[in-house]
Amino acid sequence: MASQQQLSAIKGAKVLMVGAGGIGCELLKTLALSGFQDIHIIDMDTIEVSNLNRQFLFRKSHVGLSKAKVARDAVLRFRPHVSITSYHANVKNQEFNVDFFKQFSVVLNGLDNLDARRHVNRLCLAADVPLVESGTTGFLGQVTVHVKGKTECYECQPKPAPKTYPVCTITSTPSKFVHCIVWAKDLLFAKLFGDKNQENDLNVRSSDPASSSDHAEDIFELSKDETIEHYGRRVFDHVFGYNIEVALSNEDTWKNRNKPRPIYSRDIFPDEPTKQNGNADKNCATDGQSSISAMTSLGIKNPQEIWSLMENSRIFVEALKLFFTKREKDVGNLAFDKDDQLAVEFVTAAANIRAESFGIPMHSLFESKGIAGNIVHAVATTNAIIAGLIVIEAIKVLQNDANNYRMTYCLEHPSRKMLLMPVEPFEPNKSCYVCSETPLSLEINTHRAKLRDFVEKIVKAKLGMNFPLIMHGAALLYEVGDDLDEDMVANYTANLEKVLSELPSPVVSGTILSVEDLQQELSCSINIKHRDEFDEEKEPDGMVLSGWQQTSLEKGDTSNTLGNGESTSKSLSSAMDADKNDDSDIVASGRKRKLDEASSAVDISIEANSSKKPEVLDDDDDDDLVMLDDGDSAINKKKRLQ
């Protein structure tokens, strides 16, 4: 039973929830049943059929409606006296500014992406409102507490970045199925159905030896008088046959590798072009694109079966045909979407054919969709556990019970007979540019890089600023805002296209730029250091930011990969590995202590001497595939909050 003090804190609290998905539904229900009287909830999403297996406030009749509003209505049916205010909006909208956040006693996050999490973290810091973070991936989950000046903020520790692969590996020497998926999704699908003007590393020239090099046709262009069947087989022969033969011609590449096998349509199909089985028009000629399916057209039913090479080849050609006949308006503007059945079928088939060529085991559509769409399948029970832990920590925050704050991790397998691993929060990282305002350092070619490169690749992509203002001393180089007059907008637009050293106030080696986001009330200083050359493979941005960290992801096998890894700390991997360490012990308070005195100061954030495990997790609405870092980079030790 809650004490009178706890009940008083609960009833007097004004709570902001951000996210009404897997965690959010459980959290709203738990808050209402726990006695909270004033709850506000923000979510920009609408309900999809795929949400219904775990987001229990929603029903099939709610598909297409606002998550925040439907969740509010559902809870009010059994708690009609609770005040619940819903906002069907993006938390990054300007209406949700620092003043908006200041009205709340605590903010509870149930988000599914790094960008929104960073934004909320910064607004909470600016408003001096405590934040309780959370995330789940499958059976794993975590809840962390962030209180300005007392604990680390959400951005005090590095967050895993999406794994990137060298272009040469994807295009020439794949060794894992994920390489084939990336090739099929990001190169082939984009080339066939996406923006034709976008740069693409896929070889686009015809294999026709009769064509001179000066007049070689673009193999991915559909000729005026060409049938779709012939076009599909021509593309098939080029990417799975001719391109493989070209790769084989470089003998040095295959001295220590297994050689791939060229696959041509003549080896798979009969002499006649592939024919439709007669049911395609009936099954596919529907208004909704979700109903257009190559599997349905060809009578293939089970998405969990691994297709044969013949079946993959038929799906490849049939899916391509359906895109050009049933969805011709989309061609040229498409981007891969995991909820687009036809796109998933095409990518699965293409990846499997390529995998077969390179001697890599093929995968089912179900497995391929998980890899291509960055999906880790959700577990409703994990969401419920995490929601309960969020409420427990929120009550501690409302009572200002700092000594009992805990970062709690939900594990898949018991560690020291524990599935819930509590860890004391850490103090703020003095090197954090968000909460400690530590200067950053940027190596960049100031004679070649434009201000636009700096804004897009650093200020927005890495620092997560939405409305940046950039100054060099007293000179304003760039600003974003609705209140700017036309002359100012024109001036800043012109600055974007200038190289840094040629700006009105030149940016050269030794320059210190001040970058600020007025909405987030965040500012930082960046020391500029000129550098002439960069490694295109290791430093593709052509610039290197120091003092800001985002951990790279593991180069290991993807079979052990988990969902979105936006971590608040390094603690989870150690907590999960703790039972493998002979010299460690988990005490009742949830602390992990080394038994020898010399190591007593080493906390749970230092990794165990075993294989690295997943670090953190996101809500399950849009789970992402993550390949975790192999541990090459040193991990800073963190001081536990006393």
Image (cartoon, helix red, strand yellow):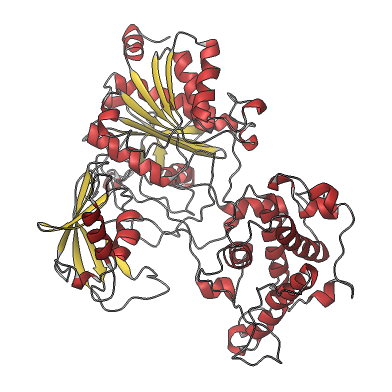
Residue 184 picture quarter: bottom right
Q: Residue at x 72, y 63 (%)?
A: 320
Q: In the image, 308: left or right of 165?
A: right
* Total marks in image: 0
Horizontal side of residue 285 vs 454, given as left or right: right
Q: Nearer the viewer, residue 619 or 287?
A: 287
Q: Residue at x 78, y 77 (%)?
A: 264
Q: Is residue 70 above or below residue 416?
A: above
- Residue drawn at (63%, 83%), measured in percent from left and top? 247
Q: Is residue 413 left or right of residue 86?
A: right
Residue 263: image quadrant is bottom right
The residue lying at 57 percent from left, 59 percent from top is: 333
Measured from the top left, where is residue 100 in percent x and y? 29, 29
Q: Position of residue 391 (x, y in %)?
A: 42, 23
Q: Is residue 418 above or below residue 72?
A: below
Residue 246 lies, in percent from the top left, at 65, 85
